[in-house]
Image (cartoon, rainbow, N blue to C red):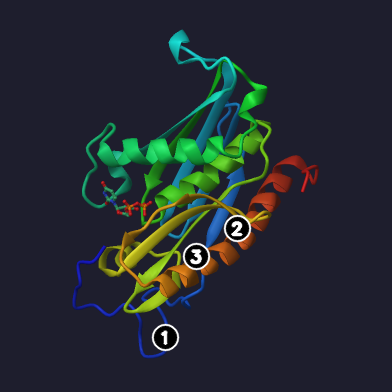
């Protein structure tokens, strides 16, 4: 964010470098039930991102001292494959992935009926195979599908979506160049039906009015992504999805 370069991110027609309108999402494809050994899984392609999510549990939490007698603990692990980015990513957790894992765990905890499963752990593995900005929100979306696939009771499906600002324009769903050279990025996790926000971060700077516009844009897109989630689950379960 913020490294102002000589490239223009919005052209004379108001279009972005990949030809999108300011409020247009990148193409998104979702597939549910892709890993046999997991209790639930999903694969999401979102623009240049390719992300797998696998869920295990609820199962008895180990080591025992991490157990909570009143609820399940949700342990999300966000991991970027070494080959997922231009410059080889050093394998293993770094500061960024540890922080992302923590905030994603908290966002998912807020939608899962964790009180139903005392002393258990729900493990959510998010593997970024190819990254092109917006991996945390695409990862949250994949995790939500994998949790639903695992049959874990949730208040609602959760949707990740980002908006931000590039060349002075509020835009939806930033790609890599926009993330690198734009002014702001605001990743969010949203429950579209109730309008609740389970995660909100901001990198860069913009005015209060621009921020509220960006959030509104992400909220609207989240309703569309929510419909895609329902369709992906129907594709797997032949229409037997509680909407
Ligand atoms: N990125 C990278 N190496 C890293 C971390 C990130 O090349 O170690 C790239 C990757 O394409 C990622 C983008 O930078 O999607 C934006 O990263 P950010 O931290 O903003 O997270 P994201 O937008 O993916 O949630």
Residue that appears at 34% across and 70% down: 206
Residue nearer the viewer, 25 or 186? 186
* Residue 169 sits in quarter: bottom left
Measured as percent of width and height from the top left, residue 82 is found at 28, 40
Cα separation, mark 2 vs mark 1, equals 24 Å
Q: Secondary structure at mark 1?
A: loop
Secondary structure category for the residue under label 2: helix
| Label 3 beta carbon within 8 A of ligand 1 | no
Callout 2–callout 1 Cβ contact below 8 Å: no
Residue at the extreme front:
208
Categorize mark 1 by other alpha carbons within 10 Å: few (<14), some (14-19), many (20+).
few
Q: Which residue is mark 3?
A: 215
Q: Residue beneath label 2, please?
A: 225
Circle 1 sits on which residue? 14
Residue 91 seen in render: yes
Tag on residue 60?
none
Q: Position of residue 240 (x, y in %)?
A: 80, 42
Q: Is residue 222 above or below residue 12?
A: above
For image coordinates 40% across by 67% down, the residue present is: 164
Q: Image quadrant for the N terminus?
A: bottom left
Q: Earlier in the sequence, mark 2 or mark 1?
A: 1
Residue farthest to the bottom, as pictured? 12
Task: Determine which quarter of the picture holds residue 170.
Answer: bottom left
Label 3 CA crowd tier, 10 Å (few <14, some 14–19, many 20+): many
Query: Number of callouts in the render?
Result: 3
Q: From mark 3 to mark 1, how far is it between C-alphas?
A: 20 Å
Residue at disc 2, CB closer than 8 Å to ligand 1: no
Q: Residue furthest top?
A: 64
Q: Is residue 37 in sight in this rendering?
A: no
Position of 53 relative to 190 (above/below): above
């Amino acid at each position: 964010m913020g490294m102002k370069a000589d490239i223009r991110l919005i052209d004379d027609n108001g279009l972005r470098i990949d030809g999108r309108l300011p409020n247009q999402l990148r193409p998104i494809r979702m597939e549910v039930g892709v890993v046999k050994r997991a209790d639930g899984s999903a694969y999401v392609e979102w623009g240049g991102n390719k992300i797998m999510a696998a869920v295990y549990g609820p199962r008895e939490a180990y080591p025992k001292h991490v157990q909570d007698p009143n609820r399940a603990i949700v342990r999300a692990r966000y991991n970027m494959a070494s080959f997922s980015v231009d410059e080889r990513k050093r394998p293993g957790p770094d500061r960024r992935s540890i922080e992302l894992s923590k905030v994603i765990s908290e966002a998912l905890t807020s939608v899962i009926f964790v009180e139903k499963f005392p002393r258990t752990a729900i493990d959510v593995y998010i593997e970024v195979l190819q990254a092109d900005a917006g991996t945390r929100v695409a990862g949250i979306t994949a995790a939500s599908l994998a949790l639903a696939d695992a049959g874990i009771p949730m208040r609602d499906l959760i949707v990740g979506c980002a908006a931000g600002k590039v060349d002075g324009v509020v835009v939806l769903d930033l790609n890599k160049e926009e993330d690198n050279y734009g002014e702001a990025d605001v990743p969010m996790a949203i429950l579209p039906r109730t309008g609740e926000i389970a995660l909100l971060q901001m990198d860069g700077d913009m005015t209060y009015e621009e921020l509220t516009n960006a959030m509104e844009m992400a909220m609207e897109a989240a309703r569309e992504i929510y419909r895609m989630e329902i369709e992906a689950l129907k594709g797997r379960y032949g229409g037997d999805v509680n909407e």
